[in-house]
């Protein structure tokens, strides 16, 4: 069901414009409780978005597809060497205040949790967020800097903010509830704007 919903999703793509193209991996893994996704805490010494919660990902290199970039980043950040045939599909693009157009790539990674080897220069820690962790209602709040609400998801004992929260929320809505929920309008907190 999850795979069919993602594969059949009519995604919305954003114009790249002046933004840099990036991709994130929504890596679905098998757990004893059912499917989960890999979520990382970025290393504290990274020059951008240090210490923030994120999905594995980064810039799309010249000549790469979003899927190839997401798989490369999974390898660079978590040591997972996976093939492109595990890709199920893509979610809506999310354009960030810091100048990126993020393409979320959903993939079935299977039972790989014992193979994970986080790269300490990029990843402080990695978590398997089980469905019970992210199948929660997000919180929407207004901020004076934007007419759009910020989105945050309470999970892993913390608040996950957009863009990661927006991607996780859209994935949850589509994959587990069969609902098409657009998230591009949801705002990031001001600390993530640079």
Image (cartoon, grey):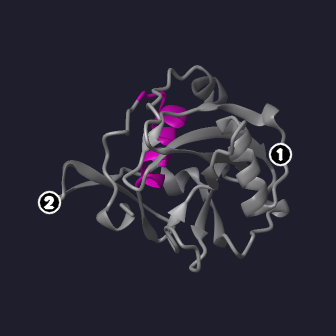
Residue 175 covered by magenta stretch: yes
Disc 1 designates what residue? 82
Residue 134 covered by magenta stretch: no
Image position of 192 with respect to 19: above or below: below
Residue shown at the point (72%, 34%) measured from the top left: 87
Which quadrant of the rendered structure holds the N terminus?
top right
Number of numbered markers: 2
Image position of 96 with respect to 62: above or below: below
Q: Which mark is residue 27?
A: none
Q: Which is nearer the eye, 55 or 168?
A: 55
Residue shown at the point (47%, 28%) measured from the top left: 13
Residue shown at the point (32%, 45%) measured from the top left: 186
Q: Which is nearer the eye, 132 or 139?
A: 139
SS under mark 2: loop
Type of secondary structure dominating the magenta stretch: helix
Residue 82 on image: x %, y %: 83, 45
Disc 2 to disc 1, C-alpha distance: 43 Å
Does label 2 or label 1 sit earlier along the sequence? Answer: 1
Q: Based on the displayed image, in which of its 4 quarters is residue 105 positioned?
A: top right
Image position of 47 with respect to 115: above or below: below
Disc 2 designates what residue? 144
Q: Which is nearer the eye, 36 or 57?
A: 57
Residue 157 on image: x %, y %: 47, 71
Residue 191 on image: x %, y %: 34, 68
**Over which residues does the magenta segment extend?**
162-180
SS under mark 1: loop
Q: Based on the displayed image, in which of its 4 quarters is residue 169 positioned?
A: top left
Which quadrant of the rendered structure holds the C terminus?
bottom left
């Amino acid at each position: 069901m999850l795979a069919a919903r993602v594969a059949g999703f009519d995604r919305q793509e954003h114009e790249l414009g002046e933004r840099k193209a990036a991709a994130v991996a929504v890596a679905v893994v098998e757990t004893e409780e059912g499917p989960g996704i890999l979520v990382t805490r970025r290393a504290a010494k990274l020059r951008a978005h240090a210490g923030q919660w994120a999905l594995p990902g980064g810039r799309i290199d010249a000549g790469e597809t979003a899927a190839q970039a997401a798989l490369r980043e999974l390898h660079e950040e978590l040591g997972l060497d996976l093939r492109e045939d595990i890709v199920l599909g893509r979610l809506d693009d999310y354009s960030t205040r810091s100048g990126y157009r993020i393409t979320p790539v959903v993939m079935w990674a299977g039972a790989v949790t014992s193979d994970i080897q986080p790269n300490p220069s990029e990843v402080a820690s990695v978590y398997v967020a089980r469905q019970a962790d992210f199948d929660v209602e997000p919180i929407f709040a207004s901020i004076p800097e934007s007419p759009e609400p910020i989105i945050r998801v309470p999970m892993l004992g913390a608040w996950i903010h957009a863009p990661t929260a927006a991607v996780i929320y859209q994935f949850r809505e589509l994959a587990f509830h069969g609902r098409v929920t657009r998230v591009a309008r949801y705002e990031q907190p001001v600390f993530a704007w640079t």
